[in-house]
Amino acid sequence: MSEPVRLVTPTGSEQPAILQDVSAGGACVRTHQRLRVGDQILLSMYFGLNQRYDIQAKIVYAKGGERGFHARYGMRFVWISDDDRFRLTNFVNERVSASQFGVRTFPASPHQGNIS
């Protein structure tokens, strides 16, 4: 993955990041922002229709980078609603399935099958 996301840091500042991996339990991002293991942040992700998430997370590992985004951070979700966990799991499963065929799936819509 390489999706733009936003982080709200422990100081309250909002920072850009690149999402590299996500699951229903956590995520991995690259960012210029310096974070420490143990920091709690808010991760804001938007992947399209009905795919917006604002999730509290805790940094569990940090790995420095050489250029571009300077660090890679792994985080565990501290709290995520059951509905968000279900939607995120389905989104991840659809992306994994689609990547096996080199295509990206479209999210299901309430108008699916209705051609006007």
Image (cartoon, rainbow, N blue to C red):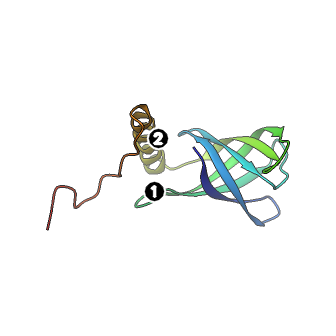
* Residue labelled with disc 1: 51
Location of residue 71 in the rendering, given as x and y in whole percent from the top left corner: 81, 45
* Residue labelled with disc 2: 92
Quadrant assignment for the C terminus: bottom left
| Quarter-of-image position of residue 78 | top right
Query: In the figure, 99 relative to 9: above or below?
Result: above
Location of residue 42 in the rendering, given as x and y in whole percent from the top left corner: 67, 57
The answer to whether 3 appears left or right of 50 in the picture is right
Q: Dot 2, how many residues are within 10 Å of its Cα: few (below 14), some (14-19), or many (20+)? A: some
Q: Which mark is residue 3?
A: none
| Residue at 55% in and 48% down | 80
Could you say which is closer to the camera, residue 70 or residue 57?
Answer: 70
Q: What SS does tag 1 mark?
A: loop
2 and 1 marks in contact (CB < 8 Å): no
| Quarter-of-image position of residue 74 | top right
Pick whichever of labels 2 and 1 is earlier in the sequence.
Answer: 1
The CA distance from mark 2 to mark 1 is: 11 Å
Q: What SS does tag 2 mark?
A: helix
Q: Which residue lies furthest to the top in this view?
A: 100
Quadrant assignment for the N terminus: top right
Q: What residue type is labelled 2?
A: Val
| Residue at 49% in and 56% down | 47
| Residue at 80% in and 58% down | 10
| Quarter-of-image position of residue 98 | top left
The answer to whether 38 appears left or right of 21 in the picture is right
Location of residue 81 in the rendering, given as x and y in whole percent from the top left corner: 50, 50
Number of marks present in the image shown: 2
Location of residue 45 in the rendering, given as x and y in whole percent from the top left corner: 57, 56
The answer to whether 19 appears left or right of 99 in the picture is right
